[in-house]
Image (tube, helix red, strand yellow):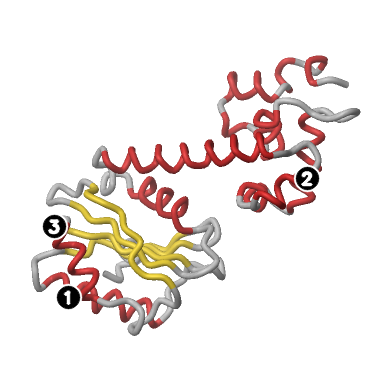
């Protein structure tokens, strides 16, 4: 049965308009993106098969060009559309931060950092540099590799903070394992950076660790 023959309240597009995007399943959201199915299958049927084949929506969204285009119903046009959608989402989050919502809405900050850092297969240490009103001045990825005292250099973080004339900073890095809990090395480098930046009156407001669909905030746990 074609989707146009379904009851109106069950059609993905109408359901989104009536109840909002949060009411849709992964398959329904993907079906709206696909727009059409293939012979004998609706867009929703195709979306369900793709999610089963890739294992999850995230895996599909993060697939490379070859993997993506190998799947039935997908191709270069859909891949470029998807990449454009993902980049628009990241830029929307970044624009939201630049309006000064970092501290009044910490969840937005965490969503933005997750969008920027979660997909990396290796650890990436980054900083959000803020002015004295806690508005975002810049986001920078500073170090790559295992995050420990040997790979994260306080002098480099300090140099970039001074270059932006920052009054505060939010530290962030990802855990490719997917587990957001901090290691002893994470705790040590947080303290080292806090002490180094304090020498020039720059406050470290938080250190956020990005896992697989979850984050850990040092500030929320009272560790900073």
Q: Earlier in the sequence, mark 3 or mark 2?
A: 2
Compute the Cα span from label 3 to label 1. Answer: 13 Å
SS for callout 1: helix
Compute the Cα span from label 1 to label 2. Answer: 50 Å
Task: Identify the residue shown where x is 67% and y is 36%.
Answer: 30
Label 2 environment density (alpha carbons within 10 Å; few <14, some 14–19, many ≥20): some
Q: Earlier in the sequence, mark 3 or mark 1?
A: 3
Circles 3 and 2 in contact, beta carbons < 8 Å: no
User: Would residue 208 appear left or right of 83 to someone viewing this image?
Assistant: left
Q: Which residue is mark 1?
A: 196
Label 1 environment density (alpha carbons within 10 Å; few <14, some 14–19, many ≥20): some
Task: Identify the residue shown where x is 32% and y is 76%.
Answer: 152
- Which disc is residue 71 wearing? 2
3 vs 2, front mark: 2
Q: Which residue is mark 3?
A: 167
Compute the Cα span from label 3 to label 2. Answer: 49 Å
Q: Earlier in the sequence, mark 1 or mark 2?
A: 2
- Res 29 → quadrant: top right
User: Would residue 220 appear left or right of 53 to someone viewing this image?
Assistant: left
Task: Identify the residue shown where x is 45% and y is 60%.
Answer: 215
Label 3 environment density (alpha carbons within 10 Å; few <14, some 14–19, many ≥20): many
Q: Position of residue 38 (x, y in %)?
A: 84, 30
Task: Identify the residue shown where x is 30% and y is 67%.
Answer: 222
Q: Quadrant of the N terminus?
A: top right
């Amino acid at each position: 049965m074609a989707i146009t023959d379904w009851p109106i309240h069950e059609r993905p597009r109408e359901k989104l308009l009536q109840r909002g995007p949060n009411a849709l399943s992964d398959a329904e959201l993907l079906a709206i993106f696909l727009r059409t199915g293939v012979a004998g299958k609706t867009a929703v049927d195709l979306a369900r098969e793709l999610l089963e084949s890739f294992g999850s929506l995230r895996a599909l969204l993060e697939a490379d060009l070859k993997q993506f285009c190998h799947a039935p119903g997908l191709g270069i046009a859909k891949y470029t559309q998807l990449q454009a959608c993902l980049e628009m989402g990241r830029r929307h989050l970044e624009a939201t931060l630049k309006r000064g919502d970092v501290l009044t809405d910490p969840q937005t900050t965490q969503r933005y950092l997750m969008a920027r850092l979660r997909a990396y297969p290796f650890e990436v240490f980054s900083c959000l540099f803020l002015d004295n009103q806690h508005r975002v001045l810049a986001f920078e990825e500073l170090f790559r590799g295992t995050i420990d005292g040997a790979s994260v250099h306080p002098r480099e973080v300090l140099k970039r903070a001074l270059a932006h004339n920052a009054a505060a900073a939010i530290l962030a890095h990802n855990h490719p394992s997917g587990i957001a809990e901090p290691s002893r090395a994470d705790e040590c480098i947080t303290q080292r950076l806090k002490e180094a930046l304090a020498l020039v009156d720059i406050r470290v407001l938080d250190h956020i660790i990005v896992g697989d669909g979850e984050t850990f905030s040092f500030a929320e746990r009272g560790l900073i």
